[in-house]
Amino acid sequence: MSNTSPSTMWFIGYENNTSSPGPPARTLTKAQTLGYDLITTLLTTPVLHARVIETVCKYLSQSADDVGTDRPLPLISPLTPDDTELAPGDNNTGLVVRISPWLDLGSADPVIAHVSRQVFNLEVAYASFCGIQHVLVSGPVPDSDETQYARALLEALSVSAHLHFFVMLPMSGESEDAGSDEQHLAELARDSYTPNDRGAVLEDEEQDDVNADSSLNTWDLWDGIRTICDYNSRLSVALELPRKLPHQFIQDRWYSEPVRAVVLQRTTFIRNTAGFPVLAKPHQDYLNQLMRLRLPPCILLSDVGALELVANEATAVEPTPAEAAKHSVEKPTAHLQYIRHLQQNQPPLPTIERFGQGYQDYMQSPLQPLADNLESITYEVFEKDPIKYDWYERAIALALTDLAEALGADTEIVVAVVGAGRGPLVSKAILASKSSGVKARFWAVEKNPNAYVHLQRRNMTDPLWDKRVTVIKTDMRAWKGPVIDGQVRKVHILVSELLGSFADNELSPECLDGVQHVLDHEHGINIPQSYTAHATPIATPRLHTDLVGRAGADKWEIPYVVMLQQYDFLATLDDTRTPDVQLTWRFSHPVPPAVLAQAEARKGGSAEHGGAGGAVGGDGGNEHNSRYCKLKFICQSRGTCHGLAGYFETVLYTSKAGEKVELSTNPVTMEAKSKDMISWFPIFLPLKTPMHVPDGAEMEISMWRQSDDRKVWYEWVVEVYIRPAGKRVRVGMSELHSSRKNGCLM
Amino acid sequence: MSNTSPSTMWFIGYENNTSSPGPPARTLTKAQTLGYDLITTLLTTPVLHARVIETVCKYLSQSADDVGTDRPLPLISPLTPDDTELAPGDNNTGLVVRISPWLDLGSADPVIAHVSRQVFNLEVAYASFCGIQHVLVSGPVPDSDETQYARALLEALSVSAHLHFFVMLPMSGESEDAGSDEQHLAELARDSYTPNDRGAVLEDEEQDDVNADSSLNTWDLWDGIRTICDYNSRLSVALELPRKLPHQFIQDRWYSEPVRAVVLQRTTFIRNTAGFPVLAKPHQDYLNQLMRLRLPPCILLSDVGALELVANEATAVEPTPAEAAKHSVEKPTAHLQYIRHLQQNQPPLPTIERFGQGYQDYMQSPLQPLADNLESITYEVFEKDPIKYDWYERAIALALTDLAEALGADTEIVVAVVGAGRGPLVSKAILASKSSGVKARFWAVEKNPNAYVHLQRRNMTDPLWDKRVTVIKTDMRAWKGPVIDGQVRKVHILVSELLGSFADNELSPECLDGVQHVLDHEHGINIPQSYTAHATPIATPRLHTDLVGRAGADKWEIPYVVMLQQYDFLATLDDTRTPDVQLTWRFSHPVPPAVLAQAEARKGGSAEHGGAGGAVGGDGGNEHNSRYCKLKFICQSRGTCHGLAGYFETVLYTSKAGEKVELSTNPVTMEAKSKDMISWFPIFLPLKTPMHVPDGAEMEISMWRQSDDRKVWYEWVVEVYIRPAGKRVRVGMSELHSSRKNGCLM
């Protein structure tokens, strides 16, 4: 996990709106001299536009002469050198090529749709031939058929394996993009057009519907397009930021989508008191948020003046924004300079984001520390946590104090760290003993033979440990307990750090059950004392796209550990958008002895204690650690659910005086309970088929922690209900997802 | 396709409701002596019930004594010989074993749920051990958690690969099944039960919702259960028929589901004037409909009296129902005898059902007659159609008459049958010439070298043909045309039978385009003249289950030819349940010459005529045969959509006088246009993920016929919308399905 700042690289582009800018390579050089990284350029010239318009008009006027529908549709002949100034070249990676903005790929008029698709295919094929990597496509024309539009894009995605398509969409409402001044093909569509026998078309389509709710209307469009294109990783959004940002939930929604370009119009900027173009604070914040993504978008500045005007200033030293403002507020690079200024003045990253740099939205399979032995580097990463071990020290000190009071000050407290790893908790236990002034003896139990070497060496060399720690090489479940003066004693404080991202997913319950026999029956304390798992439904197109591209049938049924970044909460509690994260289940330690006794007796399906009739899918020995929950969430705003985010909370210790030491990765409580803790990323339980969630819908989530005598796994089902006229109606139900095949081995 | 009557085998079972019936094998023998085929039997005895009740009561009473929640959950020890009278045996295939009906697998009380699942697992495992094949399980207890219930069934399905589970459900409302008189575990659930830390449970669950709409409420339950069990083929319904059958749409819905047992209570029967128990006419009709399924359900007679009472009558000769009624209306086999009477008096099968016997719901890949050569037997099957060829004869006769009038009576009309196969249409053309008295000459064009042999022999030997037919061996697209007196002439009537189940899916448009150059420009007639494809959304769990069990990733993206039987229309027009079958697109012949000329010029991406910019995904040579449509359907009653059913209609010929000869497989028009035609089964376009369709929802279906220069394929997308408070809201959208990989080769 590197500490590279994400702000070092911002790609800023000049959006070339002139329809005859000359050869793109020359314009690009000019723009790069001025400090831009790239430019957008129209792929074709007005020559093509004129030819297409002429063809269509001629065809349609013949139609008026009653030639009938017996004619073939008009054809657009291939591109000629006059149609485009683009050519193959080394520098073409700096070009974002814009498809003719006057096309209407989803026109209800088959002539317009046919001609548009011909031009589109000609342009895409030529861009690919020229080695272009990024293609900018205008979003669907209003009232145009989004399905047809999406289908044309899907076809274009198959033209080459390296072309990326940016679909240009405003955050909500209508596009402010000027595109070009050329006549749009949609204007030629025949008013009197009625479907002929080339296919039936909806007659009573209510066009108002799409615009009825203007808030998420363009997101709806995008959601439909990418669904038809099956979440293709080469399809993303060029998001036009409006002058007034829409409501936070719309910002959050777009943040979760693959926004790979941000379009800033001249009109999006405001003037500061010095007359210099700047962005309003909300725009700055939103842009900064987008630019912190692992794959930050490029920024396209549009309509910010012609490059020609400033070309001769290029040799001058770049002034600071303040200087520039003094010199000339109308200077055409003023917008670029302001964005570079923002780039250089990025707010610092929160601890966890800095720590997790490069790991955002990267799905890993959870650790299996019980089945595998960890590497030293893995331990080292965990030991860097600035919070976790300090909190353990606080918890141990409180427990020592309580025990000293209960057992008398001269009792030597037995502290055992089970799963000691490289020993960080042993150090904290010794420090806690020192700070609390309570005498203690220390055991460190570790099954990993490699870590065992390290622990022994540390005991000999670490001045804090000072040869006072008894190091035991064993699986904790096989440990007979500490031996003092030849006698097996009980442990007073059993310290462990076995929690996973979803609390129990690295089998902490099973491990602690297995070692509970060493714990003092009357006074024994587990640290942690209890832990809970928590979940909430999320939209994460990023992770869904990633999984679509992976091989393997099981990929949808694995809980992944992932530093969630580009996602959106579907269920929020109020206007502050606090996510509704709900408790799924709880584990507490020590477990009642009768429960453990029954579990022990049932192992292997013992006939006297339940046998085959015991556990669901197992022999019953671990059934007391199975769990089930059914959670209900209300989703204010519609969206698409791609899975569940999972978190945990744990109470390390609650003192007799009522002081609680807690850790939390739950986004609702982590700030209060363990701010800046970095040891755990959330867990992600995917859905095989994304589920549509209408406005105000209820999501019902059933989750299981299942187990047999050999392993533990999770299962999840999601249902969506709405209440039109108060009646509860199911509109969606997922399959039952199960990680049984990829369960955690005991 | 055999003509075996489906009514020969009815399996009728005696439902044994007594809780202590003695050894099942003995009861079965007794029942079989009386004419039953099988019996249901409770798997366990009251001994087990008493033990379980005692265990639970004891546990719960301790709870009242404030023992706390620290105890392990109660365990049920394995079955003892006293718990069950079932034993492994050869005759066990005649037993349908009933799981204890007093279990509550989805209880909100974890004690009840835990105990229920233990007993359930013990019983299922023992049934499997004894070689039982069919297990009868009571549906979920009202207010019980259906998800937990379904999860328990899913686990049971994994116990053995041969156990089939029948879930007992009433058609709507509450079950009338008595089950047993024993105390139900659900009654023991603690009123004061609150969720403890073994998992969070919904607190404000509104139980009324489930019962709010009593019409499809039990179907909703079933829909949820089988979704969680992923349409397992070993999970089906034992449907309880109520005394008054519910509305037709509910009957239709259940008919489409895997009903593998029908439960008839004594109370479902009425008395006829002679006092004999009979079924009302609607019940008879529905039962007859169910019994005509390819996998007919067994019939379970419940509460129809003890076998003991009648055992000694068994040796007597079975009386006819009328005799029996005279003798003793209370005779306990009266119900059985009535059902046997129904069996023997089945209404005759409609022609198409008789013809398609054994092919119901059997999915085949469509023929590729252009790429493959058909076998003689395939031709023979098609030639058996009692309607199709007569209609062709009528159409040809009309065309001959019209042409004679246009060209003069002494013109010899040139008739060519292209794709002549074994020659049935040649015969019909000759007959049409005879009947109309119009002189004609005949050509038969066939590419299949094997059929060519047959055609030549027939020309020499068939007295009707009388050596008058010129047989040409060629792909019709390569035929230069008929040669008369050394000169190539034009064809007046071009007869073909190239239509597939979805009209154009066997490439009739492409073939007829390819041979159109032989047709007389001014007077040439194509028979058929035009054809249209039609589609409607359907629920077909049967086909979905079949596809779930198949291998291959492409299986969801193939249009299958299938004789649809066990399915339900989701969109109907009115209370008569007439399906809303909509037109997708149309083809007419001959095609305008300008269109064909353009197509020819565009083949291979010719630069002067569009080139790469032409077709979507191709070179443009066949783009005039691509189609697109967007259809909207209203679904009155909620359901689950598994795909689209496709049909076709064709106008063979419309005479100058306005007489139309048509064929149709569209269920709305086939009766009027071509009743009893058997040559085509419908087509089925599946959906990968079944889609929930709420009451009154709109389904929007986008379909494409796509093509490049080499093949033709279909694509389809389904969207679901609702209108709460008038606003249109999308609640579901399928992926884009495409048969591109399995397209039809040109």
Image (cartoon, coloured by chain):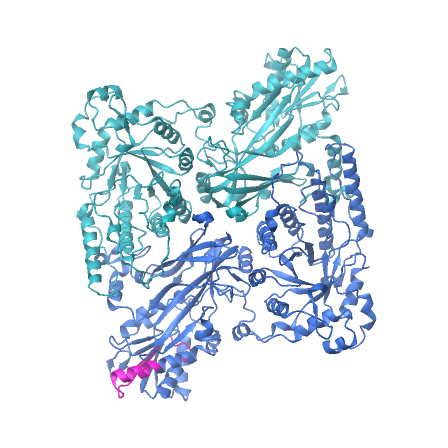
Chain colours: A cyan, B blue
Question: How far across and down, in percent of the image, does residue A423 sit?
Answer: 60, 21
**Residue B498 seen in this snapshot:** no
**Residue A46 screen position, x and y as percent:** 18, 46
Q: Is residue A163 above or below residue B381?
A: above
Whether residue B703 is in magenta: the answer is no
- In the image, residue A542 sits, relative to residue B242, either above or below, namely above
Q: Indicate the quadrant where residue A369 lies.
A: top right
Is B743 in front, or is B456? B743
Residue A463 appearing in the image: yes
Q: Is residue B417 magenta?
A: yes
Viewer-proximal residue, B44 or A361?
B44
Is A146 placed left or right of A589 in the picture? Answer: left
Q: Quarter of the image holding residue B23?
A: bottom right
Query: Percent from the top left, x then y, of residue B62?
Result: 79, 35
* Image-based side of B516 in relation to B15, left or right: left
Magenta region: which residues? B398-424
Report the residue at 18% width, 28% height from top: A310
For the C terminus of chain A, give its image quadrant: top right
Can you tell which quarter of the image residue B7 is in? Answer: bottom right
Relative to B725, B471 lies left or right:
left
- Give coordinates of residue A583: x percent, y percent: 59, 34
Residue at the image position 51 percent from the left and 29 percent from the top: A667
